[in-house]
Image (cartoon, rainbow, N blue to C red):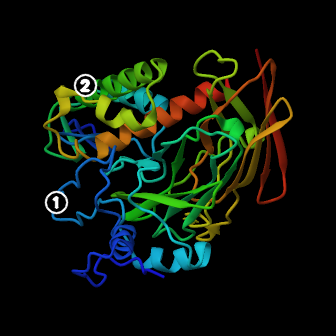
Amino acid sequence: MYDPRSRTLFAGGLLDAQRIPDVIDSDLVRWGEALRSLQALPVEVIVPGHGPSGSKRVITLVERYLDQLTTRVRALLTAGAPLSEVPDSTSLPDFATWDQYDTVHRRNAALVYLRYEREQLIK
Amino acid sequence: MPTLTPFSKTSTSCDPLRIRRRRLVLGLGALPLVSAPAVRAAVGGLPSNTGHADVSPEWELLRGRIFGARPIDAGSGRVQLIAPLRAAYGASVPLKIVSKLAQSPSLYVRKLYVLIDKNPSPLAATLELTPEVGQADFETRVRVDEYSHVRVVSELSNGELHMDSRYVKTSGGCSAPPNRDSPELIGRTIFKLPEPPKMGAPTTADLTVLHPNDTGFELNNVTVMYIPSYFVRTIAVSYAGRKIFDADLDFSISENPTWRFNFVPHGPGELRAEVADSKEHHYTGSLKVG
């Protein structure tokens, strides 16, 4: 929800701040597109689904997290890493201080791996 | 028969039979546990019983139902189960089974049972093997619905039963929604060889069946009805017409059931899988080798 008068965006589940975004019910491609369209808005204040409000940097950080997550997991799959190693091998130091790093982030890694693996299988 | 309780009556007797019996009961004792890591401490004050002879009320019941009064050796190290203590995603928990003996016609692993004590349907898989697997190591992924022991029981061709278990902390495995994007792909059965085949030696292969493996415990948010269970029930794997293993499966196996296994190619041939699901749909997959 966007209030053009105060240039405030209530981002709901699209954005979290200082907390690992959960990919479990997401379509990563469309999420990325949605974040790009939010970047194009003249927003000054963002109220994320979780965490403190902030500037557009909130969007940039979520984009960066999703980018690092998917890049790392893709590399692990290409290298033939088994699922059992994926959560440990997907450490992302930039986000290690974020809430849910020890739980949701590890699950995200496993989930993204399984999705990419399926894509590879059905090619 | 010995009961499988960790607090069986202790005895000061030196009668070797009695000592042997206690070792079977406790899964501990004089024999070193070759590959067993030390029991790990509790994380977050949760149960720390990550040993290998662990019992649970569910297991006490299952044991009688599946194995009757047959003794099960939980400390021999003949079979090892590798599973994460804290699994990242309950709907797909990787399991690895390692057998500490080579498959030879004189003594081989005849059956492997995979159990998840607290799942709605605890017996996840029963594999029936031939010596043609060469090395009875398997990897798969299972759903774990709540904190539970996961165990493997290995039945040797001489009738001995060996067990290993792990405590796995995760949850939600049976209600997580699978991918339903491409129903036309259900049943596609794919083999892959991670490494080139070795003639006359155990060669590793991966088998995946694309299938939602619906548990029946996932709620449809629109109809507020449970989505009926629909899962791969049997897989029969052969090479060049010779049986490698048969798998009898349940919805405790994750979406897109996956098995890594070994087989011994004696010459060029075809790996073949015949798959049947709970709606009696039949699928096949094959791969030419050599």
Q: Residue at x 52, y 46 (%)?
A: B141
Q: Is residue A5 left or right of residue B23?
A: left
Q: Position of residue B257 (x, y in %)?
A: 62, 45
Please tell me whether mark 2 sits on a helix, a strand or a loop. helix
Quarter the C terminus of chain A occupies: top right
Looking at the picture, which amino acid does disc 2 mark? Thr
Please state if A29 lies on the left or on the right of B37 as rendered: right
- What residue is shown at x 27% (from left), y 64% (from top)? B49
Q: Residue A60: which numbered mark, if any? A: 2
Q: Let me know if marks 1 and 2 both belong to one chain.
A: no
**Nearer the observer, B46 or B187:** B46
Pair 1/2: label in front: 1
Residue located at (28% from left, 31% from top): A62
Q: Is residue A19 visible?
A: yes
The alpha-carbon separation of the residues under discs 1 and 2 comes to 34 Å
The reply to whether residue A22 is visible in this rendering is no
Find residue B214 and report its horizontal and vertical position in percent.
63, 57
Q: At x 47% / y 59%, what residue is drawn?
A: B163
Residue B44: assigned label: 1
Check the image and report above or below for A30 versus B82. Answer: above
